[in-house]
């Protein structure tokens, strides 16, 4: 069933249970805002006397071209959430490097402004290099050691406080590398990448705590996370508070936390979207994930979330450290060195391309060896 049909099937059903969810959501939002006030307001950014952190606006030529051209261009704003940890910083630098490279190409006309939404509560060393908007983390202990729980809360704050000129937003992550200029894949419905491990139909009993039967089948919940997603800003403004509240509710429920583990926040976004009647266009060409995806094909993004381990004969040894390897988790406290050794013969195109693109970025980024 396509997005429009599923949306029509789920429409016009708003039971009392959902009203309760909304009420609880409003309470949680108030709680978080109150916590921030009690902690001293807007964090380090406010303390520094800035009313708004820098955000790259939609380029003037793009705005003019869109007005003159009857809306042929539909630029989206690229936003990713991040911490000030070294692990996050080096990935953000590589990601932003390739964003700029692809945006500069003629086919990159839809790639608008860029913001790193930094949820550490204070500026860091990359403020002058990457357009950054500082927001507060969740109150102490509220993330229960699951740092990703700060992502929806960061988006709630950013959407509320920042001036975002584009009509659409791409939610991205630090470990994304653009391999081709990305067009706006969304229409009235947002576009998202389908993850094979997000399987709502296999977790119906758990998901019914958040998506009641009155709303329809759990297949209304898309097999997605929040990233990569291109979505209208107006849609995300409605979804984000619900996404935040459902994430917190899921984390605080032992059964749900055990069932979903590290992908809990992804399920929360999918549920929040379904509660608002938003269905996504599923685009498998949105990105690839080496080493399991071996060809670039027509993809736009490489997501390097998995470790890539191979023998010197080019045989994958996933689950076992290889004689040659690239794994972002090996660089938790420092960036990877420049000029990484290329994979041995026989390693798939996707992995070779990933390492070459990391090498190009690190060769051109100033101060890389200093670990900033």
Image (cartoon, rainbow, N blue to C red):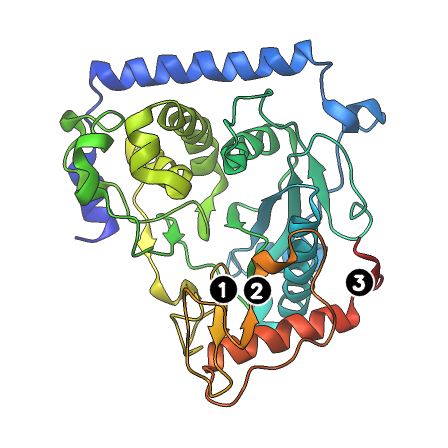
At numbered mark 3, what does the secondary structure look like: helix, strand or loop? helix
Q: Label 3 vs label 2: CA separation?
A: 18 Å
Q: Residue at x 41, y 30 (%)?
A: 247
Identify the residue under disc 2.
Answer: 177
Label 3: how many Cα within 10 Å (few below 14, some 14–19, many 20+): some
Residue 266: image quadrant is top left
User: Percent x, y for residue 337?
Assistant: 73, 68
Find residue 307 and name its label.
1
User: Percent x, y for residue 316?
Assistant: 41, 76
Q: Residue at x 43, y 30 (%)?
A: 238
Q: Nearer the viewer, mark 3 or mark 2?
A: 3
**Mark with earlier residue (3, 2):** 2
Q: Label 1 vs label 3: CA separation?
A: 22 Å
Identify the residue under disc 3.
Answer: 368
- Of 328 and 366, nearer the camera is 328
User: Percent x, y for residue 203?
Assistant: 21, 39
Find residue 166 and name its label.
none
Q: Residue at x 47, y 61 (%)?
A: 306
At numbered mark 1, what does the secondary structure look like: helix, strand or loop? loop
**Mark with earlier residue (1, 2):** 2
Q: Label 1 vs label 2: CA separation?
A: 15 Å
Asked whether the residues under the numbered discs 1 and 2 touch, taking CB atoms below 8 Å apart as contact, a structural biologist would say no
Could one spot residue 122 in this view of the protein? yes
- Of 45 and 295, nearer the camera is 295
- Of 129 and 1, nearer the camera is 129
């Amino acid at each position: 069933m396509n997005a429009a049909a599923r949306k029509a099937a789920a429409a016009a059903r708003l039971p009392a249970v959902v009203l309760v969810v909304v009420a609880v959501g409003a309470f949680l939002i108030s709680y978080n805002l109150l916590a921030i006030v009690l902690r001293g307001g807007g964090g380090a950014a406010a303390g520094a006397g800035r009313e708004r952190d820098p955000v790259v606006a939609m380029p003037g030529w793009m705005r003019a071209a869109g007005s003159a051209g009857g809306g042929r261009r539909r630029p989206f704003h690229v936003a990713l959430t991040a911490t000030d940890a070294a692990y996050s910083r080096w990935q953000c630098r590589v990601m932003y490097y390739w964003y700029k490279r692809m945006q500069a190409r003629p086919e990159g006309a839809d790639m608008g402004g860029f913001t790193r939404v930094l949820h550490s509560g204070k500026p860091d060393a990359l403020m002058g290099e990457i357009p950054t908007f500082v927001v507060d983390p969740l109150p102490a202990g509220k993330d229960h050691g699951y740092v990703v729980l700060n992502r929806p809360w960061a988006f709630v704050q950013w959407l509320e406080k920042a001036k975002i000129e584009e009509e659409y937003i791409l939610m991205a992550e630090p470990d994304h590398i653009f391999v081709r200029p990305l067009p706006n894949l969304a229409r009235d419905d947002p576009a998202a990448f389908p993850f094979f491990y997000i399987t709502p139909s296999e977790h119906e009993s758990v998901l019914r705590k958040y998506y009641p039967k009155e709303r329809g089948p759990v297949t209304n919940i898309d097999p997605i996370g929040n990233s990569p997603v291109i979505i209208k800003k107006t849609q995300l403004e409605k979804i984000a508070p619900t996404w935040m509240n459902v994430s917190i509710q899921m984390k605080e429920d032992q059964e749900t936390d055990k069932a979903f583990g590290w992908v809990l926040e992804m399920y929360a976004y999918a549920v929040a979207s379904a509660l608002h009647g938003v269905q996504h266009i599923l685009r498998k060409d949105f990105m690839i994930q080496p080493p399991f995806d071996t060809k670039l094909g027509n993809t736009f993004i490489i997501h390097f979330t998995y470790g890539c381990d191979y023998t010197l004969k080019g045989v994958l040894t996933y689950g076992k450290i290889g004689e040659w390897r690239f794994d972002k988790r090996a660089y938790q406290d420092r960036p990877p060195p420049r000029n990484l050794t290329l994979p041995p013969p026989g390693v798939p195109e996707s992995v070779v391309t990933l390492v070459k693109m990391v090498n190009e970025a690190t060769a051109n980024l100033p101060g890389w060896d200093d670990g900033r």
